Structure formats: C-alpha cells, structure tokens
C-alpha cells in the first residue's frame, strides 16, 4: 500500500497554543478526506496543521483544504479568549486506573458493530443499569421529578427550534426514508439493482427529512412544554434514552460513540431554582462518585460550537454555564461522563415555556453518558466484579 | 473611579438592559438582567472604548458583575498604564 505523505496546511493567522484543543477538536469536521492530522507548533502558536488524506494531494486539493480549515479557525477559534482552567471539585479516588477496553473486547463484553457503535453485554449492561439506577435514586431523593421515556426520533422542526442546527451542524444525524410514492420505490429498487449505491439511489428517490436522531434528551423536554406554563416554578423531568452525534473520526472505543445512552435531568422554572438545583445535583453526584470509589474532577467547560462564531464558546466559559465531570481512563486520559448546564432563558424563550404569566422560564440540565460512566468505573475497578465495591457488586447480575 | 467613567459604563449597560433600573452595585448576571453574550460584548466594548487589553487571567465574572466593579477594573488598568491605548 502506498503511504500518502502528510500535507501541510498553513494557518492564515497563528493560533495561541492554549487554544490548541479548540483547533484539534474541529479538524476532522473540516473535510471527510482528512484521515489523520497533527498540529504544528512554533514559538507558542499553532502555525499549521499536517493532514493525511484519503486522496492524493494536488495543489487544487490542498488549496481547498486550506480555505476550509482557515474558515473554521477564523470563525470558531481565532476570536476565542483562553480562560484559565477552573476545577471546582476534585477527588483522587482509590487505587490505580487502567484502560480496559481491550479486555472488554477480548472477553466478548464489547464489540464494534459500526463506526462509533459499540455493542455491550454482561456484566457491562447490568453495571450500566445499576449506575443509572443510583443516579435516578439520587434525583428522586432531592426533587419531585417526572420520569419520562421519550420516543427515539425527534422532529426536525424541534431540533431547528433549539438552535442546535446553527451551533452544531457537524453533529446532526438525520433520519430519512424513501419518498412515499410507488414510482420512488420502484425507481429506487431499479437504481440499487444488486449492488448499486444506496446513497446515490436515495439522493434521487429519498423523501423529506422530517425527523432526526436526538443529540440529547433535554430537547424532548422543551418540546413537551412548548407554549405552556410550567405546572410548577420548580419543575424537574428526568429521562433516559439513546442519543446520537456524528463524531466523525473522533470516535474512539466507548469514550466517544456516535450512538450512546444519556440519563438526563432537566430543571425548568425560576432562575434561582434551576441554578440551585444544578448545584445540588452536582454536590450529590460528587458524593455518589465518592461512595463508588471513583475519583475525577469537575471543571468549567464549553460545547464544540462549529461555524457558529467564537463568542458563544468563551461566553459559556466566562459565565460558567457548563461544567463537565471528568473521570480518568488511565494515567494520561480522561473522559467527560457528565455535564451540568445552565441555559438561561434560551430554550424556554425558543419554545414559549413560561414560568408564570408571560415570563419565560429558565432551564438547566444535567446529562450523564452511561456508557462512559460505566467504562470509567471499569477502568478504575477492573472488569472482574470481585474488584468492585461490595455493595454495588451485590446489585449487579453477573 | 471618575463620574465620567461610571457614566459611560452605566450608559453601555443600560443599552443592554432597556427598561430596567440598574443600580451601580446590582449584580448584572445573578439578577438575570443581561443575556448570555453580554459578558463577551462588555469585554470587547471595554477594550475598544478604553484602549485596554483584558488578559486571560482577568477574565473572571465577578470583575464584570456590577457597574462599580467594572469601573474599578477599568480605573485600575488605566492607573497601571501597562497597556497602550491603541489610539
């Protein structure tokens, strides 16, 4: 196989090194021909990105990649201010931490079914359910929470209303179907023949995009209360469901899936309620982690806005609108297993959710990635149940 | 902080909070008076208007929480004169 040499893409404006991660998390989304990359550092700045591509480089091809990468950098990164990291909770946990993904695969507990898609069996499955049950119990102890199971699909109009399309177009996963017409079915079948391209045939005969796969659970909750006054100025809803984000080549083991499970808790009501509820849930989550022997940290974070401008990113950090709970997977890597978010009146205004009279409500939410949480637990305690905390081991069917 | 400085900051804050009564010691963020992008707009306005640079370590919300604290910050920067005014 011929190895294609990396292509160097110069940045029109060097990016300070402390924003390197903001560059790195966007490179694969610049173009699907990029199969690998490394940042080029010089004198405290990122000055270029070396990329490997699935197609041979030529001057026109490189010029296109240069244009696209610089567009993304100019839009999303260059205007950002780096804020010093701020950790608000830290716990060392017990023992050492070791990445166990290869162990899980070797034992047949986890296996890949597609890009960013990992199937899991026992004991992972039961452990995940028990951890979720602990989270749910913690929520129900503190809040009068309505437990809801939402359908998997979410309306495209709902997703548009959240603003998600404008902020994270790179992550959206659409659901489609054939145009509901006999000629479309026959035309599609003729086009695919025995080995024709499904994608090509769909582009000709596909129907509308009425639905998407939800990137998070809380959007369902805002739809639930659309154009309504909340039943209480301190409303809490919790749901567990599958969530989907196109993570491109950033997919990695159970760390970053395209298809994963979230336990979500949404607070709707007065500003004081949603902020206080977020804090209380964070504090009780730390206590839960401590009881499970799980160390980690919680810190100020931001979402991966794409082609959406830099202001939202550093505004989110400055206002501490988002905290991420990160647990270690080995000596050098960790993963966000949960986030605690304050949305001000953004979603309530978008969906006409009122707290009282004509005043839009405030919202906050917490989302826990259950596969990640379970995986981080196993990296801490090992895949053998004998190594798990006794109280939890008794709950897990092994 | 001079009256002129306070007045200019107050005038900017009021453009973002139409119809609201804002005292100089009101916490703009805790009270929900301003939207989520206000902090960013404020920092950029301060830099442009007063020819100063808000450094990374100075990006702390409490600094920009009230008209008083914003004024104290600008006055401190001006007194330090560490940053060219860019004019």
Image (cartoon, rainbow, N blue to C red):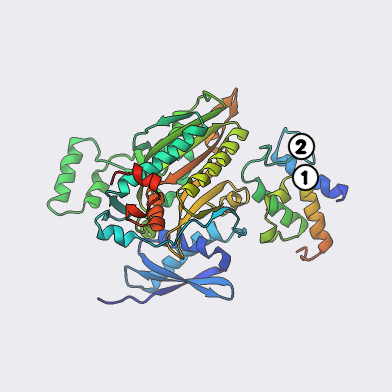
Q: CB under 8 Å between callouts 1 and 2? A: yes
Dividing the picture into quarters, in which one does residue A380 lie? bottom left
Q: Does residue A261 appear anywhere in the picture?
A: no
Question: Measured along the vertical axis of the image, is residue A50 above or below residue A200?
Answer: below
SS state under label 1? helix
Badges 1 and 2, same chain? yes
**Residue occupying image coordinates x 35% and y 69%:** A53
**Residue occupying image coordinates x 29% and y 57%:** A104
Residue A290 location (% of width, % of height): 50, 49
In this image, A327 relative to A125: left or right?
Answer: right
Question: Measured along the vertical axis of the image, is residue A86 above or below residue A278?
Answer: below
The residue singled out by tag 1 in the image is B67
Sequence-earlier tag: 1 or 2: 2
Residue B13 vs residue A188, the one in the foreground: B13
SS state under label 2? loop
The residue singled out by tag 2 in the image is B22
Label at residue A62: none
**Furthest residue to the left?**
A194
Q: Does residue A216 appear anywhere in the picture?
A: yes
Q: Which chain is indicated by disc 2?
A: B
Question: Measured along the vertical axis of the image, is residue A159 above or below residue A259?
Answer: above
Dividing the picture into quarters, in which one does residue A128 lie? top left
Q: Residues within 10 Å of mark 1 (few under 14, many from 20)?
A: many
**Residue occupying image coordinates x 60% and y 55%:** A86
Residue A244 location (% of width, % of height): 37, 46
Q: Which chain is indicated by disc 1?
A: B
């Amino acid at each position: 196989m011929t190895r294609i040499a990396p292509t160097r893409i110069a940045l029109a404006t060097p990016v300070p090194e402390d924003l390197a991660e903001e560059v790195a998390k966007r490179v694969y989304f610049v173009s699907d021909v990029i199969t690998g990359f490394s940042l080029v550092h010089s004198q405290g700045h990122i000055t270029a990105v070396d990329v490997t591509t699935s197609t041979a480089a030529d001057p026109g091809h490189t010029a296109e990649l240069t244009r696209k990468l610089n567009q993304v950098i100019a839009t999303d990164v260059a205007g950002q201010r780096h804020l010093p990291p701020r950790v608000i909770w830290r716990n060392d946990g017990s023992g050492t931490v070791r990445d166990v993904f290869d162990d899980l695969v070797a034992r047949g507990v986890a296996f890949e079914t597609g890009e960013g898609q990992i199937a899991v069996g026992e004991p992972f499955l039961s452990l995940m359910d028990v951890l979720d049950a602990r989270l749910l119990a913690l929520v129900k102890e503190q809040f009068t929470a309505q437990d809801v199971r939402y359908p998997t699909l979410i309306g495209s109009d709902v997703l548009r209303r959240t603003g998600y399309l404008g902020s994270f177009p790179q992550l959206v996963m659409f659901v489609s179907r054939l145009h509901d017409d006999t000629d479309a079915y026959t035309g599609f079948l003729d086009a695919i023949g025995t080995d024709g391209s499904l994608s090509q045939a769909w582009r000709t005969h596909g129907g509308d995009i009425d639905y998407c796969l939800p990137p998070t659970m809380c959007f369902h909750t805002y739809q639930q209360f659309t154009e309504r006054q909340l039943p209480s100025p301190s409303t809490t809803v919790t749901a567990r469901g599958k969530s989907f984000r196109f993570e491109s080549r950033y997919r990695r083991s159970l760390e970053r899936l395209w298809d994963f499970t979230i336990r979500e808790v949404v607070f709707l009501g007065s500003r004081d309620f949603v902020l206080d509820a977020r804090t209380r849930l964070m504090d009780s989550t730390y206590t839960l982690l401590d009881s499970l022997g799980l160390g980690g940290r919680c810190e100020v974070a931001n979402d991966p806005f794409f082609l959406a401008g830099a202001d939202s990113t550093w505004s989110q950090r400055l206002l501490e609108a988002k905290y991420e709970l990160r647990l270690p997977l080995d000596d050098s890597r960790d993963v966000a297993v949960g986030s605690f978010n304050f949305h001000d009146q953004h979603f309530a205004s978008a969906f006409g959710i009122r707290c009282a009279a004509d005043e839009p409500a405030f919202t906050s939410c917490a989302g826990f990635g259950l596969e990640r949480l379970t995986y981080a637990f196993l990296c801490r305690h090992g895949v053998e149940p004998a190594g798990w905390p006794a109280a939890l081991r008794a709950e897990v069917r092994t | 902080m001079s009256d002129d400085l306070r007045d200019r900051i107050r005038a900017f804050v009021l453009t973002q909070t139409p119809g609201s009564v804002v005292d100089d010691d009101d916490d703009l963020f805790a009270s929900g008076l301003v939207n989520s992008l206000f902090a960013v707009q404020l920092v950029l306005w301060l830099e442009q208007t007063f020819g100063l640079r808000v450094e990374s370590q100075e990006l702390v919300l409490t600094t920009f929480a009230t008209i008083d604290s914003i004024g104290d910050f600008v006055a401190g920067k001006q007194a330090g004169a560490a940053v060219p005014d860019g004019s």
